[in-house]
Image (tube, coloured by chain):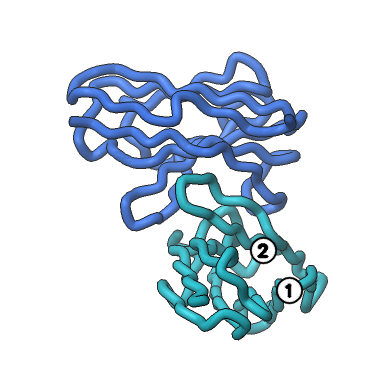
Amino acid sequence: GENVEQHPSTLSVQEGDSAVIKCTYSDSASNYFPWYKQELGKGPQLIIDIRSNVGEKKDQRIAVTLNKTAKHFSLHITETQPEDSAVYFCAASGDFGTGTSLTVIP
Amino acid sequence: DTAVSQTPKYLVTQMGNDKSIKCEQNLGHDTMYWYKQDSKKFLKIMFSYNNKELIINETVPNRFSPKSPDKAHLNLHINSLELGDSAVYFCASSNLPGPGNYGYTFGSGTRLTVV
């Protein structure tokens, strides 16, 4: 969406390595930042989210960090596994980023 | 199972036809959406309804008409289909209105192919 930029568009990592996907947004009123995972042939699924009063949130191997001053937030996946391969989307103010196709190489 | 269900999963039709996609959610959510995902995977909001009332109507051709008979259903009717309408259409729902405030639950998508 116009409000949200997402990088990189594609990302390949070796199994066990970490993956980081970054998003920037322009609407300073944004206060909720979800991340979605879309597997082939399925709809996007919410995997983690963060609100603007928090700087970091972690759920097992995934974490999201938020820098509200700089208007950017990132998804971190540690110890990647082949089943992490999917397209990941960030969102802010209802606009979605352009997606990152993550491939985890066994 | 609690979910957002949309039908059909695949739809192949000729140019000029009229078709509908149905969506139902049993999550008790107040807000439902239609998104279009193009071949580059871009997700673009089309419509948003809160408790049967239209609250978002993005720049979408008026050949697309959403209908919400109740807050659990949001159907999408498309008239005079064009080649450029080919895409995957996702229905979604969320608790409370205002995209950008709550996470969405998406349906599994309807792949529309216009030939």
Q: Label 1: chain?
A: A
Left/right of residue B71 with respect to residue A95 in the rendered view: right
Residue A74 point in image, percent of width and height? 62, 77
- Is any atom of residue B34 visible in this view? yes
User: What SS does tag 2 mark?
Assistant: strand
Residue A92 located left or right of residue A2: right
Q: Where A21 falls versus B61 (above or below)?
A: below
Q: Could you tell me the amino acid type at mark 1?
A: Arg
Colour representing chain B: blue
Task: Provide residue B43's location: percent of width, then percent of height.
Answer: 45, 51
Query: Depth check: B36 or A69 in front?
Result: B36
Q: Nearer the viewer, residue A103 or B89?
A: A103
How many other residues sit within 10 Å of disc 1, few (<14), some (14-19) or many (≥20)? few
- Residue corresponding to mark 2: A33
- Residue B99 is marked as none
What residue is drawn where x is 77% and y is 29%? B28
Q: Is residue A67 above or below residue B79?
A: below
Task: Name the mark nearer the viewer: 2 or 1.
Answer: 1
Disc 2 residue crowd, few under 14, some 14–19, many 20+, Cα 10 Å: many
Q: Which subunit holds the residue at mark 2?
A: A
Image x and y of residue A64, in percent: 70, 74
Q: Residue furthest front?
A: A106
Number of labels in the image equals 2
Q: Indicate the colour of chain A.
A: cyan
- Residue A11: image x %, image y %? 45, 77
Q: Quadrant of the N terminus of chain A?
A: bottom left
Q: Name the residue rendered at 51%, 45% in the picture.
A: A42
Can residue B56 be seen by looking at this rendering?
no
Which sits earlier in the primary sequence, circle 2 or circle 1? Answer: 2
Do callouts 2 and 1 mark residues in contact (Cβ within 8 Å)? no
Which residue position holds label 1?
A61
